[in-house]
Image (spheres, rainbow, N blue to C red):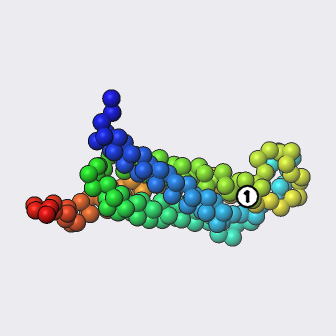
């Protein structure tokens, strides 16, 4: 039978998971809406594209992915450190921010494809049509590892430099 202590711990962990995944989800939708894109011209029936290369949208999208997930990880690690005094632990923070980063990239891609009506099948377009084109996000190991590493670093900075509240020896 679960004890009150185990229920409180599980509730704290569930709150952390919800906070991280919820904030990463909301931010990924915003990132997907604001993500830069190419204008491409359909050049053949097989779906060949000629890109109007003005800027490197892959790098810009990657930069904002790393920046946003890193800032979110730092903010959330500070909040988690502050709110879960009795259940502090780095392992949960690491894996949930990693899952949050992957969720951020995949949901951001889905948002971009859905909102900008990017064609995904050759029947969706005609030769000569100008369509938006956003390459799918591939952050690689280093891109996905930024948020957990920043969360861990900031969490440990707080752990070492922020004192624990001292219990009042005389509660009366």
Between 3 and 85, which is closer to the camera in this rendering? 3
Between 109 and 22, which is closer to the camera in this rendering? 22
Task: From the top left corner, tell me how far across and down residue 104 is, in percent.
Answer: 54, 53
Horizontal relation, residue 57 to residue 74: left or right: right
Q: Residue at x 41, y 51 (%)?
A: 16
Task: From the top left corner, tell me how far across and down residue 123 is, in percent.
Answer: 86, 45
Count of all numbered marks drawn on residues in the image: 1
Task: From the top left corner, tell me how far across and down residue 96 is, in percent.
Answer: 42, 48
Q: Residue at x 67, y 55 (%)?
A: 111
Examine the rendering and report whether any part of residue 138 can be seen.
no
**On the rendered image, what quadrant is the N terminus found in?**
top left
Question: Does residue 122 lie above or below 22 as drawn?
Answer: above
Mark 1: few, some, or many residues within 10 Å (few <14, many ≥20)?
A: few
Residue farthest to the top, as pictured: 1
Between 83 and 112, which is closer to the camera in this rendering? 83
Horizontal relation, residue 88 to residue 118: left or right: left
State the residue position of label 1. Answer: 115
> Regarding mark 1 in the picture, which secondary structure is present there?
helix
Q: Residue at x 20, y 63 (%)?
A: 165
Q: Residue at x 48, y 65 (%)?
A: 67
Task: From the top left corner, tell me how far across and down residue 46 is, in percent.
Answer: 82, 45
Examine the rendering and report whether any part of residue 118 can be seen.
yes
Question: Does residue 57 lie above or below 86 as drawn?
Answer: below
Residue farthest to the bottom, as pictured: 54
Residue farthest to the left, as pictured: 169
User: Image quadrant of residue 121?
Assistant: top right
Between 97 and 118, which is closer to the camera in this rendering? 97
Horizontal relation, residue 109 to residue 17: left or right: right
**On the rendered image, what quadrant is the C terminus found in?**
bottom left
């Amino acid at each position: 039978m679960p004890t009150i202590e185990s229920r409180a711990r599980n509730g704290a962990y569930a709150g952390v998971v919800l906070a991280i995944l919820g904030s990463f989800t909301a931010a990924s939708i915003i990132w997907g809406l604001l993500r830069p894109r190419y204008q491409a011209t359909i050049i053949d029936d097989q779906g060949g594209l000629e890109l109007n290369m003005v800027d490197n949208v892959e790098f810009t999208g990657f930069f904002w992915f790393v920046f946003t997930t890193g800032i979110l990880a730092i903010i959330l690690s500070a909040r988690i450190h502050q709110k879960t005094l009795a259940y502090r632990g780095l392992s949960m923070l690491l894996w949930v921010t990693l899952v949050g980063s992957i969720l951020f990239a995949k949901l951001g891609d889905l948002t971009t494809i859905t909102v900008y009506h990017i064609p995904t099948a050759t029947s969706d377009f005609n030769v000569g049509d100008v369509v938006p084109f956003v390459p799918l996000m591939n952050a690689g190991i280093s891109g996905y590892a930024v948020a957990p590493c920043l969360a861990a670093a900031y969490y440990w900075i707080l752990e070492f430099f922020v004192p624990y509240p001292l219990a009042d020896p005389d509660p009366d």
